[in-house]
Image (cartoon, rainbow, N blue to C red):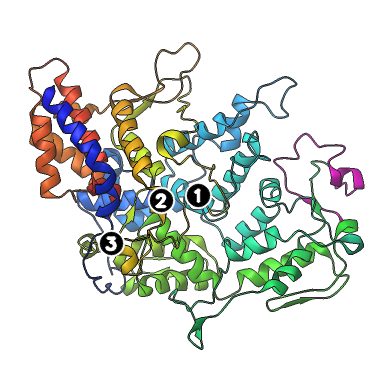
Amino acid sequence: MKTERSTTRSLLIATAMSVLLAACGGGEKVSSNTNASAQATIPDDPGAVRFLSQASFGATTADIAQLKATGLEHWIDQQFNMSRSQTGTHMDYVKSQIPLPVPQGTAVTMDPLYHSFWRQAMLAPDQLRQRVTFALSQITVISAADTGLQDSPHTIASFLDILADNAFGNYRDILQAVSTHPAMGQYLTALGNRGDNGRTPDENYAREVMQLFTIGLFELNMDGTQKMANGAPVDTYDMDDIRGLAKVFTGWSWGNEGAADPSNGRFAGNPADPMRRVIPLQFYRQYHSPDAKVFLTANIAAGSDGVQAMRTALDTLFNHPNVAPFIGRQLIQRMVTSNPSAQYIQRVANAFATGRYTTAGGYYSVGSGQRGDLKATVAAVLLDTEARSAGSIIQDDWGKLREPVLRVAALMRAFEATSQSPGQQFRIGNIDNQMFETPMRSPSVFNFFRPGYVPPNTTLASKSLVAPEFQIANEVSVATYANTLQTWIPNGFGSTATGQTGPDIRIAATEARALASDVNKLVDHVSLLLTSNTMSTATRDSIRTAVGSIAATANNSAANRVNLALFMTMTSPDFLVQK
């Protein structure tokens, strides 16, 4: 329709600037509320969608009904107690597509890994585990974009599985697992690191495990604010600490699936165990630095056992007072809001440090009582008053820009995306060119965006606020996103499987199409599922006018009305900024 085309064209022109500026608007920051609710929280429909946008890969009508029936706390407990996804592990799926060991002559691509990610995000009932795993993968980063991992779907699948296995466990176990995983060993060059015969050890992993995975660059108070000395922030470590810690991570190389085989040849990869890319690294004493290892508060004597040295090093990092606010803040950012208040950070950090989270009045309590308990930490992130308060919604500088992966996931889950391929493969591959973000494929160890990124020359910058996801939001990426949606929503997307016709993923939107004859009901339905009814009056009126211009009697009117409503909503600031 002419009106539809002109509206779309105008929207495309305006999108690049409106999206970038919407979340950078004015408004003073409102003081955060105190403590969590003292009773079971039964949300209304918008509240349920808002919670699910933070705790899952997106709301479905079934999820909304379940959440309203059980309450937030019971839903979280059900998720905590749910076994690993009924859809199987990532390794299970990748091996079903490419056997391991890989048969001679078999073409190996990353596609099965990407397909498995989306398949879990769409179909897995353990949605909270899936969302937390994704958040952890953006903190302890490895990447398929790295030359050493670009054709290693099994390796990255097994890495993603260890994050999923420990998503509700203890952060100390995650540190151990990622430090001895061959994916991390290859990515941050710790695999084959030597300290024998006076060699200078590779310092890469020592630096990043401190800067990115545990303590950060500056000493923090429990509320995430920086400690100051003489008006300047206090460094958490220096080059001597990096050098001392680097010696710890020497002597670790390829694992052996059978009995330990710390031979010189195995260290160098000859013979190569066929499973070496998916089993933990093993320790080779002859290549470990014999020197004393002095860093932070640790002093490991010369000649000490290397396996114990790693335990001591990781214990030292894990018990550093920075870890609770540093990791707690990032989990809040990945799931809820970019700029949590100091009080919010402190409550989450306390849950991490004590291993226990209890709501006000003691209605709900969770956690093992051990430092680093992620059940307690995740519950604190999601149930905090600041996360749940309706007052947060109206704050211009509260919330977060939805990253592209979460935008696509929200669309697919809310509007019944189906995969046409055998076994529902969800054949979405590398979408860097369309969405500028592919899971497990960041351009560097700093993820697609840094937690402290500040968009330059914006209102956010003038207010000293951060907006991590804006690091991949620019005129090109935003316009490309809008253009891509114009194709994906009506036509489907994803690669075509053998014997299949057309794109693999189709947006069914059966509920929306049933409402298409009534413009108001259709727009209300889309607004609820994608924006939790936070859509502004101006946006709602624009969408109603455009959708209403498509005559209800026209050919394919239901599909066209739904497609336009979805497109305009998904390119609006009301959806792009998760509240």
Q: Label 2, on which residue?
A: 78
What residue sits 54% from the left and 46% below the top?
443
Callout 3 amino acid: Arg
Q: Residues within 10 Å of mark 2 (few under 14, many from 20)?
A: some
Residue 164 part of the magenta-drawn span: no
Q: CA distance from mark 1 to mark 2?
A: 17 Å
- Numbered disc in front, either 1 or 2: 1
Identify the image quadrant of residue 2.
top left
What is the distance, in whole Å, between disc 3 and disc 2 at their CAs? Answer: 19 Å
| Label placed on residue 388 | 3
Residue 570: percent from left, percent from top:
26, 40
Say few, some or many: other residues with alpha carbon within 10 Å of mark 3 (under 14 / 14 to 19 / 20 or more).
many
Per the picture, the main secondary structure of the magenta-coloured stretch is loop
Magenta span of residues: 260-284
* Residue 378 point in image, percent of width and height: 44, 60
Judge by depth and name the residue closer to the eye, 382 or 29: 29
Q: Position of residue 355 (x, y in %)?
A: 51, 69
Disc 3 and disc 1 in contact, CB within 8 angstroms: no
